[in-house]
Image: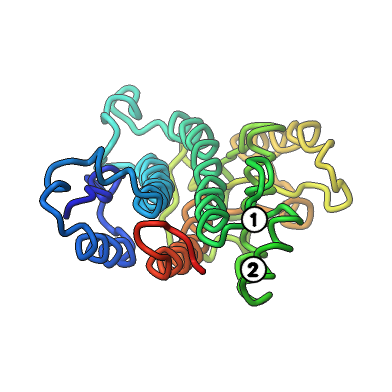
């Protein structure tokens, strides 16, 4: 492949690259027939459409990379990406280290999820010649949506609205409010949430699941009270470890397993990439414009 698009992303060492990028590389190869492009990435990257595809591939590669890292931190025996002694103490798995690690990785993960949509917005702005400013090149931007709908069907611009809103809220909370809060909670505290496909961790003598805490107060639209609510969870956590009974937390808080969050989001991310790759292939080559 002439573009090295895949090798410039995390998919150089991660499995699971969306098929649309293999198809896009094949398409680019059919256009870059001159010998001048052989082994000349700088010449190839002069084309806008190649840069758009490369950027999009790299962004979803980052999403999968950070998901792989926090998935790996949940493991108690074999690791692909972490040194065993980093997550162990006294020859025993230390889930507290893993939980703190997952919390920090989630900041990068959520940022990369939003960046994926931003990469798509940059491509759409150029491909459809929307001529929007840098600050307007955002799928959440009203002017962007208005101009895009003039070139595409309204259904297209609304297609990813729900997941984009969810990603944006979680990303903004992680970046501007507080690091995603992970807490290990026992099955007795979350009876409904524990019908899970992923295995739990062993913390001391308790079986627990690390969960993302979110939307603590549904009436707190600006999430100003979010940080102040966390101390309650520390209370519940202390009671859990001391064996005291506590009330069902699902009546007060919403919890999400980060592994299941990625499982839920990723198909939508792939669909988004497929749509943008189709747009790229529709564009005139080499101008990069859809007339």
Residue found at x 34% / y 23%: 89
Task: Name the residue nearer the viewer: 14 or 182.
Answer: 14
Q: Position of residue 129 (x, y in %)?
A: 57, 58
Query: Which numbered circle lies on residue 8?
Result: none
Query: Which numbered circle lies on residue 157?
Result: 2
Q: Residue furthest top?
A: 90
Q: Label 1: which residue?
A: 139
Displayed quadrant of residue 31: bottom left
Q: Position of residue 229 (x, y in %)?
A: 79, 36
Residue found at x 36% / y 44%: 65
Dot 2: element? helix
Task: Name the residue nearer the viewer: 87 or 161.
Answer: 161
**Crowding near the residue tagged with mark 2, few <14, some 14–19, many ≥20 C-alpha atoms within 10 Å:** some
Contact between marks 1 and 2 (CB within 8 A): the answer is yes
Q: Position of residue 131 (x, y in %)?
A: 63, 51
Q: Is residue 52 left or right of residue 11?
A: right
């Amino acid at each position: 492949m002439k573009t090295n698009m895949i090798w410039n992303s995390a998919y150089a060492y991660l499995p699971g690259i969306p098929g649309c990028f293999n198809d896009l590389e094949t398409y680019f190869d059919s256009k870059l027939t001159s010998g001048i492009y052989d082994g000349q990435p700088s010449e190839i990257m002069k084309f806008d459409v190649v840069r758009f595809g490369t950027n999009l591939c790299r962004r979803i590669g980052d999403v999968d990379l950070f998901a792989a890292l926090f998935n790996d931190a949940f493991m108690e025996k074999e690791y692909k990406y972490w040194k065993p002694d980093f997550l162990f103490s006294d020859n025993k798995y230390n889930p507290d280290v893993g939980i703190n690690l997952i919390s920090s990785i989630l900041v990068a993960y959520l940022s990369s999820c939003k960046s994926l949509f931003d990469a798509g917005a940059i491509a759409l702005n150029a491909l459809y010649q929307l001529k929007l400013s840098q600050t307007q090149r955002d799928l959440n931007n009203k002017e962007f949506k208005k101009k895009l709908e003039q070139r595409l069907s309204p259904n297209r611009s609304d297609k990813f609205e729900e997941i984009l809103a969810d990603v944006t809220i979680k990303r903004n909370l992680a970046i501007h409010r507080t690091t995603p809060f992970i807490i290990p909670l026992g099955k007795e505290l979350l009876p409904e949430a524990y019908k899970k496909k992923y295995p739990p961790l062993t913390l001391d003598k308790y079986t627990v699941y690390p969960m993302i805490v979110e939307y603590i107060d549904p009436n707190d639209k600006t999430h100003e009270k979010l940080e102040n609510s966390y101390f309650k969870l520390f209370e519940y956590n202390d009671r859990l470890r001391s064996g005291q009974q506590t009330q069902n937390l699902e009546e007060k808080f919403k919890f999400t397993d980060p592994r299941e969050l990625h499982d839920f989001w990723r198909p939508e991310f792939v669909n988004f990439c497929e749509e943008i790759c189709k747009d790229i292939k529709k564009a005139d080559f080499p101008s990069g414009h859809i007339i």
